Image (tube, rainbow, N blue to C red):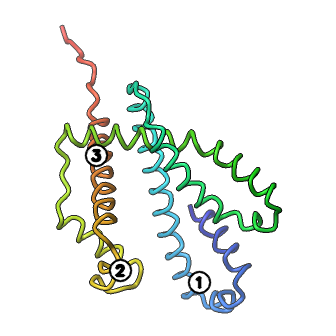
Amino acid sequence: TEEEVNRVLEEVLTHNPKLQIEARDLKARENMKQSLRQRLEYQTQAIAGQEEDDRIVEQLLSRSKFAAPESLVTERAIELLRRELMNTPDIKTKNEAEQKKITSELFEKIKPRAEKEVKASFVLAEVAKREKVEVSEEDADKRIEIMAKMAGKEKEEFAAGINAEQREELKGQIRIERTLTLLKKRSLLIKKPIILKA
């Protein structure tokens, strides 16, 4: 809404004196609002899409009765833990015993999420296989081109930094996205009740 855009704009201007000066010009202020509105709309759509994906995955997992391989769960939990620790810079100020305690507690907290993600990857891979969801090398190239633009680099330069394993991971990610899109379309195909007329 207009109110939300104005509120966020005021927050941005409060922390950026340079933009405050620019915003005195009405045209510049309107351009800022337009740019901000587009970002907020994109963010809202992304969150809504993620929530929809999560609901679909939850439904699939509730119907799947299998244990995720412990080694893969541990591997994923360690990966998530590393990311979490990167966002916890004050951990370096603690002594070794405190660091171990924090790391151990975080690991236990993260493990259920890791297990869910591993199980979801197996289930979605199986759905993709049954539904014959394919990802070509051309699809991977197109995604790399988009990623290069977002990083502000030339496609060739960006692609040179992607090894064969990372390329396969990227294709797997695209396959999962397509599988979720397919499932979302299917979820809209709800049978309507038949009304019989005399």
Q: Position of residue 82 (x, y in %)?
A: 59, 60
Classed neighbour count for the residue bearing mark 3: other residues with Cα under 10 Å, few (<14), some (14–19), many (≥20): many
Residue assigned mark 3: 179
Tell me: residue 3, above or below residue 66: below
**Which of pointers 2 and 3 lies earlier in the amino acid sequence?**
2
Left of 55 or right of it: where is 128?
left
Callout 2 secondary element: helix
Classed neighbour count for the residue bearing mark 2: other residues with Cα under 10 Å, few (<14), some (14–19), many (≥20): few
Please identify, in this view, whether the residue under mark 1 or under mark 2 is nearer the observer: 2
Left of 166 or right of it: where is 27?
right
Q: Amino acid at mark 3?
A: Thr
Q: Amino acid at mark 1?
A: Arg
Q: CA distance from mark 1 to mark 2?
A: 27 Å
Evaluate if marks 1 and 3 touch, with contact meaning CB atoms under 8 Å apart: no
Callout 1 secondary element: helix
Evaluate if marks 2 and 3 touch, with contact meaning CB atoms under 8 Å apart: no
Residue assigned mark 2: 149
Residue beneath the point at 59% across and 83% down = 29
Residue beneath the point at 32% across and 62% down = 170
Q: Position of residue 67 (x, y in %)?
A: 44, 30
Q: Amino acid at mark 2?
A: Lys
> Extreme top residue here?
198
Quadrant showing the N terminus: bottom right
**Which of pointers 1 and 3 lies earlier in the amino acid sequence?**
1
